Amino acid sequence: SRLRWRYGLYNVPLAGKTGTSQNHADGWFIGYTPRLVVGAWVGGDSPLVRFRNFENGQGAATALPVCALFLREVLRAPGLDQWQGGAFPGLPPESLRRLDCPLRIKSPEELLRDSLLADSLFRDSLRLVDSLLLDTPALGEGR
């Protein structure tokens, strides 16, 4: 993630979520470590304030850097040990069993047994124009 490679938070357990409002008016980011939650919102109070484009207005470009710089300082600063370190708790075995996510899919046929997944992945309307996919039969179809 950008938090790790751009801001040097390589060995820190962390997670986060960015967001962008309609019309590029606001960007936000919420991040957390096992001991700290941090968030930032970047935007204007006036509905007339907008970023020029999606790239500049998205939460990853506006609010994430604010949180990342703060996290980097807190996680490296002497005297702030209570906010550093830790690990996220693991899921209980029962929860892991209920997730029912295969580690790998053994064959295309196995994938196609899940009709919702097959419909999502192989719908013709989702095919790219001028793509190699146009010359390749859909998974599960013969040549």
Image (tube, rainbow, N blue to C red):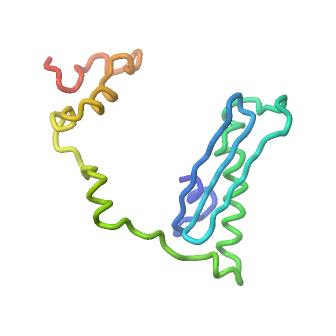
Residues 77 and 130: in front is 77
Say which residue appears at 59% left-offset and 72% top-offset. 35
82 relative position to 120: left or right: right
Q: In this view of the protein, which residue sits in the foreground, 116 or 78?
A: 116
Looking at the image, residue 31 lies above or below residue 57: below
Q: Is residue 85 above or below residue 17?
A: below
Q: What residue do we see at 31% from left, 53% from top?
A: 99
Give the vertical position of 112 relative to 16 (above or below). Answer: above
Q: Position of residue 56 (x, y in %)?
A: 71, 37
Comparing 27 with 69, the one in front is 27
Total of numbered circles in the picture?
A: 0
Q: Position of residue 32 (x, y in %)?
A: 59, 62
Quarter assignment of residue 138:
top left
Vertical comparison of 18 with 94: above or below: above
Left or right of 117? Residue 105 is: left
Q: Position of residue 131 (x, y in %)?
A: 37, 20
65 left or right of 88 in image: right
* Residue at x-position 71% and y-position 28%: 23
Residue drawn at x 71%, y 69% as measured from the top left: 73
The percent coordinates of residue 69 (x first, y second) are 71, 61
Quadrant of the image occupied by residue 38: bottom right
Q: Which corner quadrant holds the C terminus? A: top left
